[in-house]
Image: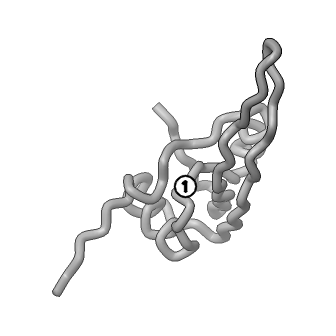
Amino acid sequence: MTTTFDPKSVIIHPHVTEKSGVLSQGGVYTFVVTKKANKQQITQAIKGLYKVTPVKIAVANMPTKNIFVRGRKGTVAGLRKAIVTLKKGDKIDFV
């Protein structure tokens, strides 16, 4: 039995912030990934979507946060980030 691997089911979207923009100039990119994704799946997804091979991948779970806006309590959903380092000269273009 062969199963097909869908890279879009692992990587949700690029995590674009001021800090990730500065890091991307050095070849380090940040992505929001699914909660159950592991490093091997993230590596395969990066290879499949962007045609580059990562050198290093770090994964961080960001916790949910409590907020208080306009007199109402709420929460901001947590997420799982993958910080992907590429070799020198490789880059990813987000269109």
Question: Which residue is nearer to you in this view: 5 or 35?
Answer: 35
| Residue located 53% across and 67% down the image | 36
Answer above or below: position of 87 versus 69. Answer: below
**For numbered disc 1, what is the local secondary structure?**
strand
Residue 53 in percent (x, y) is at 51, 66
- Mark 1: which amino acid? Val
Picture layout, residue 28 above or below residue 44 = above
For the point 66% across and 42% down, the residue is 77
- Front residue of this view, candidates 81 and 71: 71
Q: Is residue 31 above or below residue 70?
A: below
Give left or right: position of 52 versus 22.
left
Q: Residue at 64% of width from left, 58% of height from top? A: 82
- Quadrant where the N terminus lies? bottom left
Please, which residue is most extreme toward the bottom here? 1
User: Position of 68 compared to 89: left or right?
Assistant: right
In x, y percent, where is residue 46? 47, 60
Q: Is residue 73 left or right of residue 11?
A: right
User: Where does the image place residue 30, in percent across and percent down from the top left?
Assistant: 65, 49
- Residue at 58% over, 66% down: 54
Q: Say which residue label 1 marks.
A: 33
Front in this rendered view, residue 38 or 83:
38
